[in-house]
Image (cartoon, grey):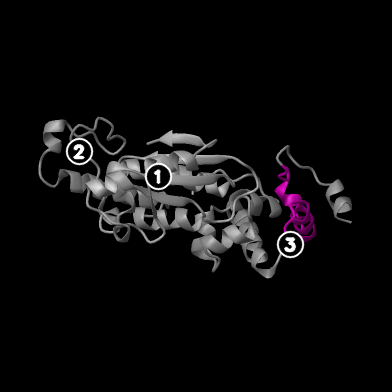
Amino acid sequence: MTEKSNGNRKLCIIMSKGSLDMAYIPLILANSARMTGIDVELFFTFWGLDVITKKKMGGLNVATVGNPSMHPWFHIPTLLGAIPGMSAAASWMMRGEIDKLDFPPVPEFVQLVIDSGANVYGCKMSMDMMKLTKDDLVEEAEVLGAMEFMELSEGAQLLLV
Amino acid sequence: MTNQILENVEFDEDGFMIDPNAWTAEIGEAIAARENLQLTERHWVVINFARQEFEANGEAPTLRRITKTTDVDTKELYKLFPGGPAKKAAMVAGLGKPTGCI
């Protein structure tokens, strides 16, 4: 645990998605919160676990099927999105755009958020389901049950992504 | 002493200097004292870099730019400026509240 900041404001984010575009939302919010002195707890559950799983975090993809929100890059009709390589191409493009904004790649961003003092947790039940252990997650992550997370988030502002 | 220096400086309601160009190192020290910060050589690495960036680009650098360009890493930056380095570093450097997301 890191030292607590001056105010009492605390933000808890539950991250349940594992796609490249969604991964940035909790990371940007967590980082912004820490930069202004707000305490942050990040709980990764279901597909969100990919974002802190060492083997997966570097290779997250954008969904090109059933994703109506691909602009400003380009809109991909669902049928075309199913063409092999389409998701990889879109992901590649998005990584380029993210880099242009000087946002770090996901693994570096997770480390940045951890270094800034946010606490990171993997959901125990989801990890059991996906046959993941603590060793599969980034080093600083702790494994936590949902009930423990509820205790931890008492009085905090809670956000589900 | 500290109060005397800050008496003639204009601040917004959050404690940021209204005119960054009126900043001096002395004022920086006084703002730090107001914020209960003991400035060290390492703080000055950050403050001087922020001033330099402001003079070059007209705005405070993002934390990511500070950690990428100077030898101060993220962990140290948070230790140097507890309570939110983005706010505190810009405040001591006499700059406005940073607007960047990173």
Quarter of the image for residue A28 reads top left
Chain letter belonging to callout 3: B
In this view of the protein, which residue sits in the foreground, A21 or B80? B80
Q: CA distance from mark 2 to mark 3?
A: 52 Å
Q: Is residue B100 visible?
A: no
Residue drawn at the location 22% of the way across and 52% of the way down: A131
Residue located beneath label 3 in the image: B38
Q: Is residue A81 visible?
A: yes
Q: CA distance from mark 1 to mark 3?
A: 35 Å
Residue located beneath label 1 in the image: A43
Looking at the figure, which quarter contains the C terminus of chain A? Answer: top left
Residue drawn at the location 48% of the way across and 40% of the way down: A151
Find residue B51 and report its horizontal and vertical position in percent.
65, 58
Residue located beneath label 2 in the image: A64
Horizontal side of residue A1 vs A102, given as left or right = right
Find residue A133 and report its horizontal and vertical position in percent.
28, 56
Task: Name which residue type carries label 3.
Answer: Gln
Q: Are marks 2 and 3 in contact (CB under 8 Å)?
A: no
Q: Where B71 falls versus A2 (above or below)?
A: below
Q: Which mark is residue A150?
A: none
Same chain check for tags 2 and 3: no
Magenta span contains residue B25: yes
Task: Name which residue type carries label 1.
Answer: Phe
Chain letter belonging to callout 2: A
Q: Are marks 1 and 3 in contact (CB under 8 Å)?
A: no
The stretch of residues the image draws in magenta is B15-37
